[in-house]
Amino acid sequence: AKPALRTSRWTGKALLQPAKKGDSTLHVSGADDIRPGDEITIGAEKVVVKGINEDGSVSLVNSVAGTHSAGASFYDAPPAKRLERPARKNANKLYLSNVDALEPKDVITIGKDRTYVKEVGFSISIGSQLEAEQEVGAVIKKGEDEVAKLAKPAAEGASEMLVSSVAGIAEGDNIIVGSDLVVVKQVSKFVIIDPALDAAYP
């Protein structure tokens, strides 16, 4: 079994109205970055978000088990993430199944390691090599549509590029980087962490 990889962030959110046993709606001080599927920890219990209502309240998949007073704070843990590639000891880069809602300073817990997100990034591996060097900001197109930009310069001969986003890019896609037409071999999402890992994880 793979070790659980958990991410959580303190959102500085609080209940605007008390929540009592059986409630399936929470009235909160800010639902902007709460998404369906997020797990909210309030007191000693966890509830899962079903959706956000028009009035900014949060509807839950499971109802509240205890009683929580107005002003009670809670944590929000984005949906589960998995390691997509093994992480070696002393690694400071983790390839994850998704990086949704992760931002710098978020806490990542994996096995016995507890570390912080320093940077969130995306990369594309290509089947051939770039014929020409490309600058930061070079546009990446799929057909006529711009899908991303280069986040760091890509050297001539490079087979992996750091990009601004991988939304809308999949393995096997033909993309144009600057003036080169290349085939996408792999799409990756990663976080740079600090401190580095004390142990290796499969």
Image (cartoon, grey):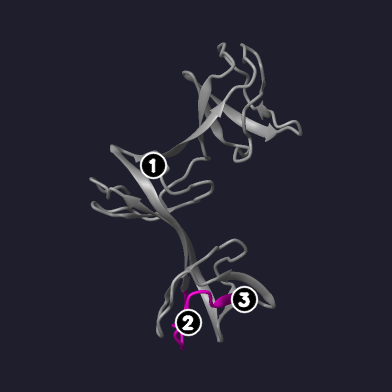
Is residue 139 in the magenta section? Answer: yes
Provide the residue designation for mark 3: 141
Residue 87 bears which disc, if any?
Answer: none
Is residue 114 in the magenta section? Answer: no
- Counting other residues with Cα less than 10 Å from the Cα at mark 3, is it few (<14), some (14-19), or many (20 or more)? some
Tell which of 176 and 137 is nearer to you.
137
Residue 108 bears which disc, if any?
Answer: 1
Predominant SS of the magenta segment: loop
Residue interval drawn in magenta:
126-141
Upstream in sequence: badge 2 or badge 1 = 1
Instruction: Provide the secondary structure element on which disc 1 rests.
Output: strand
- Image location (x, y in percent) of residue 201: 30, 47
Provide the residue designation for mark 2: 134
Q: Alpha carbon of mark 2 to alpha carbon of mark 1: how far? A: 33 Å
**Amino acid type, label 3:** Lys
**Amino acid type, label 1:** Ile
Vertical position of residue 24 compared to residue 165: above or below? above
